[in-house]
Amino acid sequence: MGTANRKGSAVPLLCTMGALLALLDPVQPTRAPDCGGILTPLGLSYLAEVSKPHAEVVLRQDLMAQRASDLFLGSMEPSRNRITSVKVADLWLSVIPEAGLRLGIEVELRIAPLHAVPMPVRISIRADLHVDMGPDGNLQLLTSACRPTVQAQSTREAESKSSRSILDKVVDVDKLCLDVSKLLLFPNEQLMSLTALFPVTPNCQLQYLPLAAPVFSKQGIALSLQTTFQVAGAVVPVPVSPVPFSMPELASTSTSHLILALSEHFYTSLYFTLERAGAFNMTIPSMLTTATLAQKITQVGSLYHEDLPITLSAALRSSPRVVLEEGRAALKLFLTVHIGAGSPDFQSFLSVSADVTAGLQLSVSDTRMMISTAVIEDAELSLAASNVGLVRAALLEELFLAPVCQQVPAWMDDVLREGVHLPHLSHFTYTDVNVVVHKDYVLVPCKLKLRSTMA
């Protein structure tokens, strides 16, 4: 019996310890994508095209610096054979499905031997690239394999042998693969900029985090992202999406460079965070005064002996929700509107529940999603609490529906007047943008453009 009692008494103790340990162990946020993008083969070609000048600068510096360093060390060889020009004739990128990328660079050199006509030389570099996720969560473009070849553009056998001898002295083939690694520094800086912390409002930020390395296919390069939101530097635990998001299948005939996809959950989480930041606590002016309101609600007159302006103070009573349907985006707001008078000592005598559905207009400026409230599609007012007796719903709508429908959209638009940063690389902007609303997600096909400061 004594043993049984000791066992029984241990059970509550173990339960208590388990509960304490659970409190000490913070809940880990669910890692699930809510947006992403696909870089199409056309987009990859554009990135290759705008990379040519940068590649030419890097290769010119390194190839010509090899000879300059020899001169500094006292060698007379550079004066006999020197590289006079470096030109990147072609640079291309192609997808290796389920593996990564293949980089091709064709470089034209001119080498001027002493007392001889400059000799044309062609360097061909082939490198296989892959993307890894670093320990800091950033993506890194790395070289898997590199195969450079150097060839003198000569048709005569004797000249070819002589050219081969000169090439071996002037061009360090082994260093060409190091040059490829240097070429990846700029793309990797851009990949790091993808995970920057972007402001939404003065005390609210968002950050896009890759969940895994991108997927390479004939369709392009697909990357899934999870958005984290912060208020005053603290991460906001947003509700878990009831429906997992995955990148939609795209048409193979797309002429876009990049196609972004943003889920319904992304937009709902955005407004959820703004609510937590207090962005939707609003003051709504009214044309009413206590005297004019007393003509409709007689008990108001007994509360105030002087005529004061009526003020509406609104706050969300539950989290907002975004609904995406084919060709339509809407925001559902669930407000409590407190009606009262007095400044600065505001005293409420009436509380109204306001359920408002506002249509949203989505557009893109530079790399920001602009969200504006187009029109109030539906609004219902009902009595929540009253110090002035029962007030019919019809009278509530007659008195307060107009200011709510006019001021709530204006307030919402002002909160997001700067727009919401989309996933992007810092030195690129978006052009030829089209925003297409589908059920449960928004597609943003666009073209990339290197900013003029980097061109």
Image (cartoon, rainbow, N blue to C red):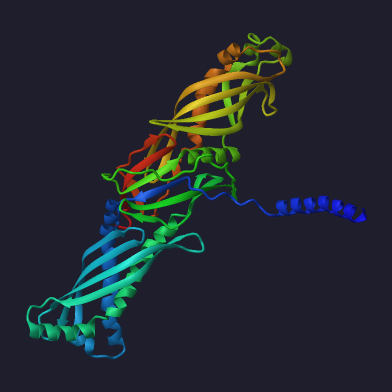
Asked if residue 178 lies left or right of residue 374, the reply is: left
In the displayed structure, 122 sits above or below 329; it is below
Q: Quadrant of residue 186?
A: bottom left
**Residue located farthest toward the front when viewing the structure as drawn:** 1
Q: Position of residue 386 (x, y in %)?
A: 70, 18
Tell me the quadrant of the picture where the C terminus can be found. bottom left
The one nearer the camera, 118 or 441, is: 441
Labels in figure, total: 0
Residue at figure coordinates x 40%, y 38% from the top left: 442
Residue at the image point whose x is 39% and y is 54% from the top: 425
**Residue at x-position 58% and y-position 19%:** 381
Residue 312 in picture, x, y percent from top left: 61, 24
Query: Which percent across, then down, holds residue 291?
Result: 65, 12
Q: Nearer the viewer, residue 321 or 95?
A: 95
175 is higher (above) or lower (below) than 362: below
Q: Is residue 189 above or below residue 320?
A: below
- Say whether residue 332 is left or right of residue 443: right
Q: Residue furthest right?
A: 2
- Vertical placement of 340 versus 117: above or below? above
Residue beneath the point at 40% across and 51% down: 424
Q: Position of residue 33 (x, y in %)?
A: 48, 48
